[in-house]
Amino acid sequence: MPKTEAMTRISALLVGGPTLHFTYAGLSILTDPTFDEPGVYPGGATLYKLAGPAVPASALGEIDVVLLSHEQHADNLDDSGRALLAVVPQVLTTIDSAERIAHATGLVPWQRHRVGDAVITAVPALHGPEGAEALSGDVTGFVLEADAHPTVYVSGDNASVDLVREIADRFPDIDIAVLFAGAANVGRFGDSDLTLNARTALEAAEVLGDAVIVPVHAEGWFHFSETRERLIGMFAHADRADRLQVLEPGERADIG
């Protein structure tokens, strides 16, 4: 989409974990809603939430769109987050997840969907090593475009730098990249992480050119096996600290 010299900056607030609220082209957008207080989520792999949301959902006002990486894991959609979906006009997610969420729109990779003045494209993601889909399920990321606005990439629960490279090839002018990091790992694939770790997040940043890197999904759950501080240190030691914009949970900031 055409860009101008004075692109609109986006206003963003990190709720915690993978949950980011931001404004874009007149829209109020939320990623992977998680608003429960700390608790335990039994399942194939028991998940432990260690920190509640920095702000309640009610503090965000009306949400126009939820970008949902997937719904099969509580660290991407917990109980309170699931309840919130019922009052959100549009929920974009995978085909598989849309089958289990009323009124959600399922998108296949590279499918475009217009919401107001924004075009949102579903992009591929891999929740673990090659072949992880059989155990982890399908996941998705998103690229947002609008006239006079930055192009924004939201990775979702993706661990593959090769897929980031494929996305960057199709969208060479990504301005802001929201990367789900934290090296999520429940031991399902040994030492192979389910999301980007500090090292692979740095590799992804190199692939993404000059994009501002906004890390999320890096605190608040026990299975996040690396701290946010490790990611910050990795970028600093590589002389790439200027590429990062680290948000403090609960504090709104402009990005871009």
Image (spheres, rainbow, N blue to C red):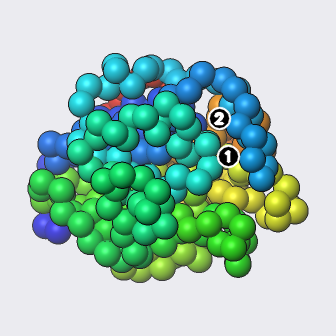
The image's mark for residue 182 is 1
SS at mark 2 in the image: loop
Instruction: Give the residue displayed 39% in from the left and 34% down from the top.
Output: 84
CB under 8 Å between callouts 1 and 2?
A: yes
Q: Position of residue 95 (x, y in %)?
A: 43, 69
Q: Is residue 164 above or below residue 92?
A: below
The picture places residue 73, in percent across and down from the top left corner, at: 62, 49
Indicate the amino acid at tag 1.
Gly
Q: Residue at x 26, y 71 (%)?
A: 112
Relative to the observer, which residue lies in front, 170 or 41? 41
Residue 22 appears at what percent x and percent y? 32, 39
Q: Residue at x 12, y 56 (%)?
A: 117
The residue that disc 2 covers is 219
Q: Which residue is drawn at the image coordinates 53% and 64% (left, top)?
A: 139
Q: Quadrant of residue 147?
A: bottom left
Q: Is residue 10 left or right of residue 137?
A: left
Q: Pick whichever of labels 1 and 2 is earlier in the sequence.
A: 1
